Structures are given as structure tokens and as C-alpha cells.
Image (cartoon, rainbow, N blue to C red):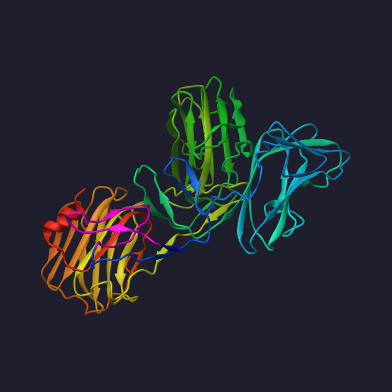
Amino acid sequence: MAVNPSIQLGTSGNWAIKEDNLLAYKQLGNKFFDREFDFSRGTTATFVGRNGFIQESGLNGTEIVTNGDFATDSDWSKTNATISNGLATITVTNGGYSAINQSITYATGKEYIITAQVQGLSGSSGKQIKFQDRGNNTGGLNIANGLITLDETLQNIEISWTANSNSDIIVISRSSNSGDYSFTIDNVSIKEIQLDVPRIDFTDDPTGHLLLEPQSTNLLTYSEDFNQWSKLNGGTGSLPIVTSNNSTSPDGTQNADKIIFNKGNATSNSDYSLIRLDYGGSDINGTSSVYLKSDVNINIEISSDDISYKTISVTTNWNRFEVSDATSDRLSMGLRGTEPSNSSATIYAWGAQLEQNSFSTSYIPTEGSIKTRLADAAFGSGSSDLINSTEGVLYAEIASLTDFSGSISINDATVSNRIELGFTSSSRAIIYMEVGGVLQVYERPAVSDITSFYKIAFKWKLNDFSLHINGNKVATSSNGVTPSANTFNNLSFNGFYSNNFFGKTKCIAVFKEALTDEELECLTTI
């Protein structure tokens, strides 16, 4: 999917700023122009929206279910089912067929997602129901064969699939279980998924930034349903008590679980109350993370391997806590031994994740199986008539995700002619320029924290090169050549020297003329 950014550049109202949540470069005149980046990912992904809630990218805002909250007794066909008090109740007698359904118009080949809340009532414990797209799969949608096992807690259901006909019917029905039982359904929603959609993320950033991340997999199969986790106790400790969907989570809905720990007398590490979920594979060099809050400030422990526990301070606000370990194979939370000093704790938990990375990436929700978010890719902007190869300025306001980000580059699609700008390990910025395969500029100035935003500008001109960061000139060179005219023809979020750029971007701009030191100072000053 193409990204059409809008940037205003220049002095006296022309300098680079971000507008309308998207990024590129232009000037109110004839020096700079809007250009589109092509964007791809191939999966949905989450981000923090302007409202502060975690959202999923790619969801079309148009709801295609009518009366999904069952506010009225209308729009649904019912077989042994009723609608009242904002709920649909389905009653099965002697294993007979019971269902509700609604005609839905889909587009063939498009991805869709259905979400709903289901709760078992009398006789339903252990019984299975199915969400079925009649035109696509008479056996149920593609999550555990479409089957959902009922219990008496409120379950949040999320299923995605590809439509294969223009007019299908979504059916919510029982599977072939004998006996008498009943269950309720509420908040049914179906929306189209657009996979290749960029994310404008507002995490700790009121103005927003483009978020580009590497591929990652959440190895924990139940990221929100903590009733599916193992509950452990020892000594005088008690089993943790989990209440599902007890509190509003960071995504703004009531789907966070309440967990109560009590480790008893706590005279040794044999006294404990823990909850944990293994991923079932061999030990990995990984990072576990989870969103937690509490009614009062309190300490608990988390671990990524059940060996090296880390004491964390849970507050009355949602925070994401993480712990990394070379032998990660699970996420554990709870109270153990004499530390923390409190013998009991009540917390609220949501959004657990274990990934084979040295740092946490954006949240990947799971509902019974592991899930992978593919890497973001932005590429394909620029042309030789818009990028001046003989002189100019490459400007970016960027931050790294961790101690290495890759680079943004101007190039001719080869390694021989390129300018790369980004971050490397050991908290260093990098500028790298080759012309005709010959190195012209290579600078790695130290910066304090590459996960913070920096304004970086590199000027190139025959025998006149300089690098400016946050208002300071940090490197110069008066010896070097530039490419011949019409050499550079591409601006992209990937480089040959240090790989694709994964990080946060507020602005990227290419100037067709070399700017003065005063202009560069103005451009890069925080």
C-alpha cells in the first residue's frame, strides 16, 4: 500500500515539520515535492493511537454487522434462540440444532475479522460451539477448526479468515454436543482487514511517528486469557485466583483479568503463589512482557524462565513490564519467598508476550496459538529528477527501537552510490557515503540514547560535507567527490551498509541544495 506523506520544508515557514500523521518531503515552491513510499507488511499489527489506547492497524472502520450488540430483537435469524437485555441466548435441547445468523456481504479474497463475547450458562461447561462462514467453511472458521469450548467465564473471541464468495452468511451455532445446555453471545463485530497499512504510533509521543519494526512472534498462546495459564502454589501459598474480563485494559475494552496472589507465611522460597505460561519449545534468548496495574502500588515478581526473578513495582496506572533472559521459555508472575515483602497482592493483567528478541516489540495478541507479525517495509520513493546527486541535504528526525536500527538511504539501487543515515550499536549515529564504490564519508559520532529522537542532517557538496545533530555540527570534511548528475534516484527505509531501518520516524526530507551552517542549525535544533 502506498503511503502519501506531507512535509513542509524551508526557512521562514518552509522547514521540515510533520503534518496529517504521514511522512515524506516537499517545499512550498519548486525545490521539494511530495513523494509516496510503498509500504508492505502482510499482517496486521498494533500501535498506540492518538487516544492512548492500543489499536490494531488495518481494520476498516466500517462495521458490517447490524445490531451486533443486540440492543433490539431484530436483524438476526434465530433457531432456538432469543434476544433480550442486550444479549442473544442460544438454548440447545437434546443436542438439537440451535443458531443465530445474519446475511453478510463480503468481497471475495478479502480478509475479515470477527470479534464477539461468549459465555456458557447452564450445562454448557466443556461444550463446544462454532463460528461458521457458510460460504467459506462449513466446518467453522480457521481457528482450532472454528470450535470454541464454553465455560462460565466471559470469553473474548477473535477470528480472522479470507472470504471466498461475494455473499456469505455468518452463523453462530452449536457443534454436535449432546445434552441440554445454553450460552450467550454479545458484541458481535465483523470488519475488513487491510494488511499493508503503516502505523502512526503515539507511544509517549503526542505528535505521533511512523513505526517500523522487524518480524516477531508472540510465543505465548494466550496473551489475554490468564485462566488458561498454569496456577501454582507451594508451602503455605495459595493458588492464584483469576477473574476474567474484570477491568478495562490498555485497548480500552473490559478484557483485562484480575489476579490475586497469596504466598502465605513466606518464610522461604518454598512458599509461593504463581501463574505462568510456557511456550513449549527449547530455551531461547528472549524477552517477556506484560501490561500490569493494581488498585494500590505493590511489588510482585516476574520471570522469563522461572529462575531469575525480577521484582517490579506495579502502580495504579497501566505499564508494560519486561524481563529478558538467555534461557527464556515462559512468562511467570506472582509472589515467592521472602521477596517481595508483601504476602499477598491483587493485580490486573493484559497483553502478555514472549518473543525471541533482546527487546520488546509492539503487542501481538494471541487467542490459542502463537502469532507472527511480519516486518514493516517502506521503500520506492524518489527519482533522479527530484534528488540532486551533486549536492543536497538528507534530513531525518528518527529514534531507534534498541541498540541498532539500520539506516535510511539515498541510492541508485546499488552499493556503489549511496548515502546512509541511521544508528549503530554503542549509542552512535552513522553517516556513510560511497561514490562509484569509493568511500567518501564515514562518521559514527556518539549520542547519549539512540532510543530518543534525534534531528540529523547530512550535507553533501564537492569537497564540502558536514553532519549536524540536534543543532550541533559534529563532523566535517573538505575532501571528497559527489556523484554525477542524475545518479541518485531512490529514497528508502533500508540501507546496504546496516540493513533495513527499524525505528520511529517523525520526518524525512531531501533538500536539492546544500544548506548553510545557519540553516542546518535551525533545521536540526530541538
Any magenta on residue 357?
Answer: no
Q: Nearer the viewer, residue 159 or 423?
A: 159
Q: Where is residue 31 shown, x and y percent of the image?
A: 23, 67
Seen at 12% across and 59% down, the residue is: 517
Q: Is residue 84 left or right of residue 471?
A: right
Q: Is residue 182 left or right of residue 19?
A: right
Q: Quarter of the image holding residue 486? A: bottom left
Q: Quarter of the image holding residue 9? A: bottom left
Q: Where is residue 301 shown, x and y percent of the image?
A: 48, 32
> Is the residue 299 above or below the residue 13 in the image?
above
Q: Which residues are magenta?
A: 4-28
Tell me which secondary structure the magenta stretch mostly adopts.
loop
Seen at 53% across and 38% down, the residue is: 350
Any magenta on residue 21?
Answer: yes
How many numbered marks appear? 0
Would residue 424 be seen by someone viewing this image from the given angle? no
Q: Is residue 99 left or right of residue 492?
A: right
Q: Residue furthest top?
A: 265
Q: Where is residue 429 shown, x and y percent of the image?
A: 25, 57
